[in-house]
Every structure is written in structure tokens, then in C-alpha cells.
Amino acid sequence: MLKMREVASSTEEFLEGKAFIRVMPEVNKTVRPSSVRKVIFCSGQVYYDLVAERERLEKNDIAILRLEQLAPFPFFSLV
């Protein structure tokens, strides 16, 4: 994953005033919130594998959210 362009952070993300994001939202513009039928929570490499499979199957009704903090579980970030 170290060489994946999608994983790299921009320098702006390290500036003052920025914070750690516990739950990364869906960034796919083809998945409209009104059409979401299923939400998948995952972390790490699994996220990129699921996104690739979703694109291969052309599924636009599944949102995939990345959990960057598993413990303690970020319950309040999901509300």
C-alpha cells in the first residue's frame, strides 16, 4: 500500500487546524446517498479491494466507509 497513489496524504493534511479522521467518508461520486442500499465498514487494504470489486461489478448502491480507528470504536463519528 505504500506505493498506492490513493493512500498518500497531501501536505495540507498535516497543517495546523487539521485533525485525525476516525471514519473516512465515501469519496466515490457515482454512489449517490439516496441510492445506497448497503453500507460496508472496513479498514486497511480491504477497502481498496472492495472498491475495485464494486467498480468491476458496476454496483452504485453500496457505500464503503473506512474505519481508521477500531478501538475504542468511533460510535459517535458514525451518527
Image (cartoon, rainbow, N blue to C red):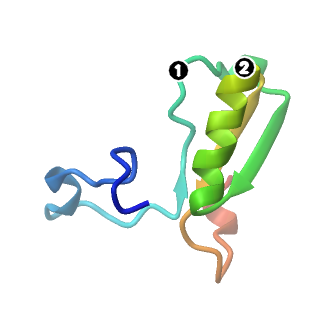
Q: Position of residue 26 (x, y in %)?
A: 57, 38
Q: Residue 30 versus residue 15: which sits nearer the camera?
A: 30
Q: Give the quadrant of residue 11.
A: bottom left
Q: Nearer the viewer, residue 56 or 76?
A: 56
User: In percent of the image, x 71 and y 35: which residue is there?
Assistant: 53
- On screen, residue 66 versus residue 13, left or right, reads right
Q: Amino acid at mark 1?
A: Lys
- What count of labels does the image hold? 2
Q: Is residue 63 above or below residue 12?
A: above
Percent position of residue 55, x then y: 65, 25
Instruction: Pinpoint residue 5: horizontal percent, then vertical percent.
Output: 33, 45
Q: Nearer the viewer, residue 42 or 19?
A: 42
Q: Residue at x 70, y 66 (%)?
A: 75
Left or right of residue 62, residue 46 in this image:
left
The kind of secondary structure element at disc 1 is: loop
Q: Say if 10 sits above or below 73 in the image.
A: above
Q: Quadrant of the N terminus?
A: bottom left
Residue 54 in the figure: left or right of residue 22? right
SS for callout 2 = loop
The residue that label 1 is drawn on is 29
Mark 2 to mark 1: distance in Å? 10 Å
Q: Position of residue 21 (x, y in %)?
A: 44, 61
Residue 55 vs 46, above or below: the answer is: above
Residue drawn 84% across the image and 35% down it: 38
For marks 2 and 1 on the same chain, the one whose residue lies earlier in the sequence: 1
Q: Which residue is mark 2?
A: 60
Q: Amino acid at mark 2?
A: Asn
Q: Identify the residue at image location x=38%, y=66%.
A: 20
